[in-house]
Amino acid sequence: LLKTYDMFTVTAYAFALGSLFYLPFVISDIVTTLQTVTIGAWLAVLYLALVCTVFGYIGWYYALKKTEASKAAVFLNLIPLFTIIMSFL
C-alpha cells in the first residue's frame, strides 16, 4: 500500500474511515456538545489529534516504508506511549 500511495494519503484515508464509524454516535449529541464546549477544549482536542496522533501515525508509516514490517511492528506499540507523553505537554 505504501509503495502505491504517499504516507500522508494512507494516514488521511485511515482517519477518514475511522471517523465514519464514530459518526452515528456523534450525530445524536452534536448540537448540545457544540454549545457547551469552550474554545480551549477545542484547541486541546486539536492538539491531541494533530500532534499526538497524526504525527505518530505518519512516523509509523514512514518507518514501515523504510524498514521491514516485522522491524517496524516493534515501534507500533510506542504510539500510545508517545501520545500519553505528548498529551502532558
Image (cartoon, rainbow, N blue to C red):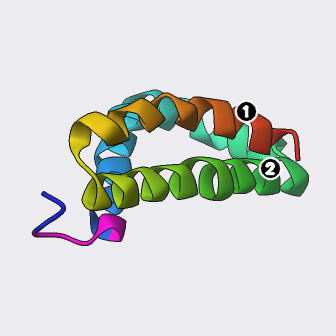
Q: Which residues are magenta?
A: 4-8
Q: Residues within 10 Å of mark 2 (few under 14, many from 20)?
A: few
- Number of the label disc, if any, that sits on residue 50: none
- Is 10 on the left-hand or right-hand side of 29? left
Evaluate whether residue 13 shows in this view. Answer: no
- Is 9 on the left-hand or right-hand side of 75? left
Classify residue 51 by image quadrant.
Answer: bottom right
Q: Is residue 57 magenta?
A: no
Amino acid at dot 2: Ala
Question: Badge 1 is on which residue?
Answer: 84
- Residue 58, x across and y down, in percent: 45, 59
Q: Is residue 58 above or below residue 49?
A: below
- Number of the label disc, if any, that sits on residue 44: 2
Q: Residue at x 32, y 38 (%)?
A: 71
Q: Residue at x 12, y 57 (%)?
A: 1
Pick the residue in front: 61 or 25.
61
Pick the residue in front: 22 or 66.
66
